[in-house]
Amino acid sequence: MKIGYARVSTTDQNLDRQIFALKKAGVQKIFEEKISGKNMERPKLKKMLEYIHDDDVVTVVSLDRLGRNSHDLTDVIDKIRRRGAVLDVLDLPTFAGVEDGNLRALLTNLVLEIYKYTAEEERQKILKR
């Protein structure tokens, strides 16, 4: 099953763009949240992580929807994997065409590590501003 997670940082912000993209990607169940990404006490994220299981695909529009620093992102991604699900980030490159599963996993993990670092750097810039 395709499971989506949509998050914005404040109650003033709108989730419509993310929900539209998730539905377009074929997501069947969406967990929505209006809370800062720096806050790891996100009830809907926790509920989604408890809900997922083997062979589910967790879909987010952007990696920074799951967390704002490398440690938190690693923690969430590890929880997704431990539940037997896989992560699909819509704004990241896809390696679906790579036939070798090990190579596909390696490339995906490499891209995730680069983007986790980028998300953390962006968060640091926001804090400085």
Image (cartoon, helix red, strand yellow):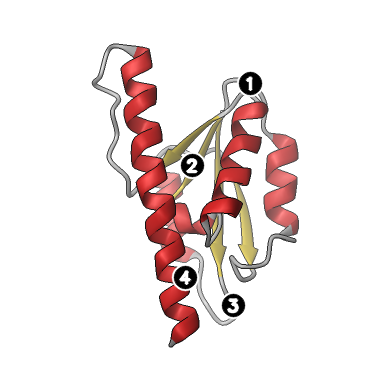
User: Which mark is in front, 2 or 4?
Assistant: 4
Rendered location of residue 46, percent (x, y): 73, 49
Label 3, label 4: how far apart the Cα atoms are: 16 Å
Label 2, label 1: how far apart the Cα atoms are: 15 Å
Q: Amino acid at mark 4?
A: Arg
Task: Look at the picture and state if 93 lies above or below 16.
Answer: above
Residue located at (66% from left, 28% from top): 82
Observer able to see residue 14: yes
Residue located at (24% from left, 21% from top): 97
Question: Decide: marks 2, 3 in contact (CB < 8 A)?
Answer: no
Task: Look at the picture and state if 94 lies above or below 119.
Answer: above
Residue for badge 4: 123
Residue for badge 3: 10
Task: Look at the picture and state if 129 lies above or below 89.
Answer: below
Label 3, label 1: how far apart the Cα atoms are: 32 Å
Lower position in the chain sequence, tag 1 or tag 4: 1
The secondary element bearing badge 2 is classed as strand
Which of 88 and 22 lies nearest the eye of the viewer?
Answer: 88
Residue located at (56% from left, 73% from top): 9
Label 2, label 3: how far apart the Cα atoms are: 21 Å
Rendered location of residue 118, percent (x, y): 37, 58
Lower position in the chain sequence, tag 2 or tag 4: 2
Residue for badge 2: 59
